[in-house]
Amino acid sequence: MNEFVQQSLKQCFIDIEFDVIEWNTLFTNWRQGAKHPSANGAHAINVSYAAMDPFFAMVRFTSTKTFPPVSNNWCYFGNPEFDKLISDPRTTFDDKERDVALGKLHARIVEEAPVVWIAHDVGPRAMSAKVKGVVQPRSWFIDIAPMSVD
């Protein structure tokens, strides 16, 4: 997948190099942030993570309150506008109003593009009729124990 991203970005005149490290080390570096020596001068990081709720999906990447070592805003992205957009849904208790506020936050994240979303597979599906026993979860995680392949 990384090589596909590298080739695709090259078509946009963006050259990237990889600093390939072990997955747990990557997570440690992610928590330490881009300014930490362990980042090795990187300008971006490619991390897999679970987006279970608005905090994990959006807030920790755009809030000035989530700069390392507090949370995972690796690139130190944030400003007063985003902090206000984050505050609104956190202080709104009406479900519909909160959804509207989260929609505004999401729209600004898309417009500003502090991150590039490479893959979104929080809802895996069986890809073959040979796979049996798939129970689509109501959460972000799927139980593979009952699955089998004919």
Image (cartoon, grey):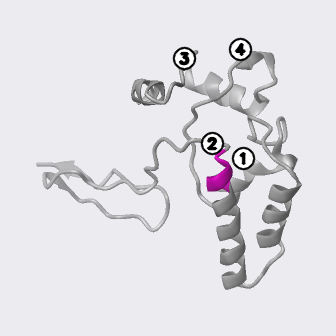
Question: In the image, which is nearer the foreground, mark 1 or mark 2?
Answer: 2
Q: Identify the amino acid type marked 1.
A: Phe
**SS at mark 4 in the image:** loop
- The residues bearing labels 3 and 2 have C-alpha atoms spaced at a distance of 17 Å
Q: Is residue 51 above or below residue 94?
A: above
Query: Which residue in the protein does label 1 denote?
Result: 61
**x%, y% of residue 128?**
17, 51
- The residues bearing labels 1 and 4 have C-alpha atoms spaced at a distance of 20 Å
Query: Which residue in the protein does label 3 denote?
Result: 18
- Picture residue at 56% right of the left edge, 19% below the top: 22
Q: Identify the amino acid type marked 2.
A: Val
Tell me the tag on residue 40: 4
- Dots 1 and 2: beta carbons under 8 Å? yes
**SS at mark 1 in the image:** helix
**x%, y% of residue 48?**
54, 38
Which badge, 3 or 2, is on the more N-terminal residue? 3
- Dots 3 and 4: beta carbons under 8 Å? no
- The residues bearing labels 2 and 4 have C-alpha atoms spaced at a distance of 19 Å
- Dots 1 and 4: beta carbons under 8 Å? no
Answer with the quarter of the image where residue 4 lies.
top left
**x%, y% of residue 33?**
77, 30
**SS at mark 3 in the image:** loop
